[in-house]
Amino acid sequence: MTCIIETLKKENLYKQKIKFLVDLEFKIGEQKIDVIISKDKGRLIEQEAVKNGIEL
């Protein structure tokens, strides 16, 4: 599963990502999830995440 995070808050992105993963695991259990923090929508990885990822 791939998830992309878009945030207006640019500080502490690493902490935001970890908190998101912990909260998500609590809700859906342990699963393989790739989380991408949106920085530049021109990046190929972000385009693929939007195209093929799962909206949470």
Image: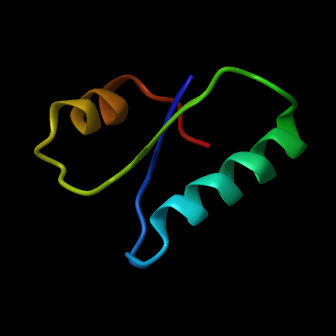
Query: Residue 52 sits in which quadrant?
Result: top left
* Relative image position of residue 9 (x, y in whole percent): 43, 79
**Residue shown at 28%/27% (left/top)?**
48
In front here: 20 or 14?
A: 14
Q: Please state, as top left, top right, bottom left or bottom right, where the N terminus lies in the image.
A: top right
Q: Is residue 49 left or right of residue 31?
A: left
* Relative image position of residue 16 (x, y in whole percent): 58, 64
* Relative image position of residue 10 (x, y in whole percent): 37, 75
- Counting every numbered tag in the picture gives 0
Query: Residue 50 sits in which quadrant?
Result: top left
Q: How is the image coloured?
A: rainbow
| In the depicted structure, whether residue 37 falls above or below residue 30 | below
**Residue shown at 49%/72% (left/top)?**
12
| In the depicted structure, whether residue 29 falls above or below residue 52 | below
| In the depicted structure, whether residue 29 falls above or below residue 56 | above
Q: Please state, as top left, top right, bottom left or bottom right, where the C terminus lies in the image.
A: top right
**Residue shown at 57%/55% (left/top)?**
17
| In the depicted structure, whether residue 31 falls above or below residue 17 | above
* Relative image position of residue 18 (x, y in whole percent): 64, 53
Query: Residue 32 sits in which quadrant?
Result: top right
